[in-house]
Image (cartoon, rainbow, N blue to C red):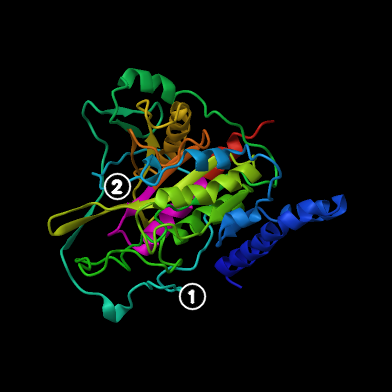
Amino acid sequence: MTNRKQRKAKKIARCIVLLMLPLGIAGAADGVKSLRDMLSETNAVSIEETPSAAVPAKKGKDTSIYAKAQAERTDDDILCGSLILSEGYGITAGTIEDPLLKLESPLETVNNKAGEKPYPTEEQWTSGGDIIRTTYKPYSGTTFFDLKKHGQVNNKTDIPNETLIKESRCLPDFTIEDTSEPQVLIYHTHTTESFEPYVRDNYDSGFNYRTTDDTKNMVMVGDAIEAELEARGIGVIHVETIHDYPSYNGSYGRSRESIVPILEQYPSIKVVLDIHRDAISGEGIAYQPYVEIDGKEAAQVMIISGCDDGTLGMPSYIRNFRFACRLQERLEGDNPGLTRPILFDYRHYNQDLTTGSLLIEVGSHCNTLEQAQYSGQLIGRSLGGMLNDMKED
């Protein structure tokens, strides 16, 4: 059985347990204990259907954070977000000796349940504009500043760099426990975002680089992160629900509806990552930001940490920023050149829900499937090492 099949089997088992949980809570105490024992047998779970089904119904007035979020939500509010089209950034330094898992190539994976929008076959690919392969280097300028150890920040706010430099040296606002309970939640607001099949000179002007095939979209990247975290003993819940198809508008609201019940059910979760890919292009050209790490090409990544201008409902945004800086330093120190500077800007992206909530752009649409998967593994390895270092004695 392949690593992917083994992980999928574990995911299915955990999904069944989650769906049975309301019955367990309503049953006898020994039934609840049995369910808790089953949950403790593995660290990772993926949720492919509506996650609210796993949350017990409450009697009386619902005072949960989910109910509060629903009451405050409007159809066109800040939860809906917008497509990110950004410029590229990058860095240098560090080394790590920690082997990665051997994963099945996403290009070679055959998915018999690819959904309504499958990934193009070899015969369906066409040529369009030019793909520019590039490696983004460190930046200079008034909006950029270096972190203490490794990496940079691109400050697009009115907060002085000097203030943010001080904040960047603070520890994250949470601790990690030695427990089998999940402590990381991975999800995808733009689940169907996809990539090039392999390195080539031209992109496909007829393909919008979105697919419901979860072996070729952001779920594949999330799987790679999950696998490396799990291998390092970090409990993970990976939400595989598609939030941006068939409708793209309102995807941030739908992803919020998926994750809030999970956060309420598992207060052990400290880190919440919304994994995307960027779209870096111009007239007739598109960019492939990559870097070679240990002899293999990886897609360069960018962390986005939102700032509140007083209208976004994120009073604790600076705590996410502290975590972003610590993760950026670890990623860049372990994998020189992997990161583009943290984008610190007036964005929401559901980052009000924890003090460890971030959005991570893994490459761009003209990066390849294997480059993106490899970057997912590098993220998982560095994050797993960082979280284990944060465990209380």
Q: Position of residue 20 (x, y in %)?
A: 72, 60
**Image position of 178 (left or right of 336):** right
Distance between the alpha carbons at the discs numbered 2 and 1: 29 Å
Can residue 74 be seen by looking at this rendering?
yes
Quick one: SS at disc 2?
Answer: loop
At x 34% / y 44%, what residue is drawn?
A: 337
Residue nearer the viewer, 173 or 57: 57
* Furthest residue in direction front, as rendered: 60
Identify residue for label 2. 84
Task: Indicate yes or no whether the magenta region holds residue 372.
Answer: yes
Among numbered discs 2 and 1, the one appearing first in the sequence: 2
> What residue range appears in magenta?
361-382
Drawn side of residue 204 relative to residue 228, left or right: left
Task: Give the SS element for disc 1.
Answer: loop
Specify the quadrant of the image occupied by residue 121: bottom left
Say whether residue 346 is magenta.
no
Q: Name the spot of residue 144 as percent of width and height, x first.
A: 27, 29
Q: Nearer the viewer, residue 241 or 37?
A: 241
Between 78 and 353, the residue placed more toward the observer is 78
Vertical side of 293 occupied by 105: above or below: below
> In the rendered image, is residue 41 in sight?
no
Residue 113 numbered mark, or none: 1
Crowd rating for badge 2 (residues with CA inside 10 Å; few <14, some 14–19, many 20+):
few
Q: Position of residue 43 (x, y in %)?
A: 65, 53
Kind of residue indicated by mark 1: Lys
Instruction: Name the quarter where the C terminus is drawn.
Output: top right
Local crowd at mark 1 within 10 Å, few (<14), some, or many (≥20)?
A: few
**Residue 66, located in which quarter of the rendered image?**
top right
Task: Where is residue 106? Give x, y as percent.
Answer: 43, 68
